[in-house]
Image (spheres, rainbow, N blue to C red):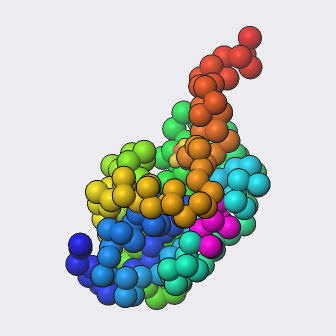
Amino acid sequence: MVTMTPPRLLLHICCGPCLLGSLLHLEGEREGLEGFFCNPNIHPLAEYRRRLEALRSYAASVSFPFSVGGEYGLIPFVRMVAGREQERCRHCHGLRMRATAREARRRGIPAFSSTLLHSVHQDRDAVVEAGREAAEDVGVEFLPLDMRGTWRAGKSRWRATGLHAQRYCGCIYSEMEREGMKVLDNLREMNR
Ligand code: SF4
């Protein structure tokens, strides 16, 4: 259990499974917590819709309020990382943390954090750095919660819901890597 100050927090949601695990960590601390799903990094469109639909079902089942930021973002996302695919995660974290920081400021919420800090598959230091930079730029507070302790429990609870569980991080590059092809190999292939 953590103590959250200030009392209102905008929680960036990367996906339903990570929201479930984060809420396990934040048990008893939900008052003042609002969710924000903003992930132009999730591709293709069918997968984006499946993840959002799963999140909607889960959030409704636990009465957790959240809003959706932006639309499906394949084209702007691909343009953003084109030519720097190897460092795409840094840009991806930065994009989502800035959007969440701006949304917090727009709504008058003094602080934000992210369910990315629940995932053991994310680079925690990189997410924290992106959150801190966004907070400084926008003028709100970033809370670097460490919610990884409920990872296993969250995963098994999500499985029990029967809702869609993703097989890769989100972007088309991570889908390719999940299927066994590395970004570098793909670039070499193109340059042959
Ligand atoms: S692998 Fe995940 S964190 Fe990295 S760019 Fe793709 S969606 Fe974003």
Q: Residue at horizontal 58%, vertical 53%?
A: 165
Pick whichever, 166 or 122, lies toward us: 166
Where is 6 relative to 18, above or below? below
What is the quadrant of the N terminus in the image? bottom left
Relative to 119, is 170 on the left or the right? right
Relative to 2, is 99 on the left or the right? right
Question: How many numbered marks does the figure carry?
Answer: 0
Where is 125 relative to 28, above or below? above
Residue 133 seen in this snapshot: no
Where is 64 relative to 184, above or below? below
Pick whichever, 48 or 111, lies toward us: 48
Q: Residue at horizontal 59%, vertical 60%?
A: 162
Instruction: State yes or no: residue 6 in magenta.
Output: no
Residue 43 seen in this snapshot: yes
Pick whichever, 42 or 143, lies toward us: 42
User: Could you tell me residue 38's position as x and y percent?
Assistant: 59, 66
Pick whichever, 101 or 69, lies toward us: 69
View extreme (top): residue:
192
Where is 15 relative to 143, above or below? above
Q: Residue at horizontal 26%, vertical 82%?
A: 5
User: Could you tell me residue 183's position as x and y percent?
Assistant: 61, 28
Q: Which residues are magenta?
A: 51-57
Relative to 69, is 98 on the left or the right? left
User: Could you tell me residue 149's position as x and y percent?
Assistant: 28, 57
For the stretch drawn in magenta, the main secondary structure is helix
Question: What is the quadrant of residue 146 in the picture?
Answer: bottom left
User: Could you tell me residue 119's position as x and y percent?
Assistant: 41, 53
What is the quadrant of the C terminus in the image? top right
Q: Residue at horizontal 51%, vertical 45%?
A: 89
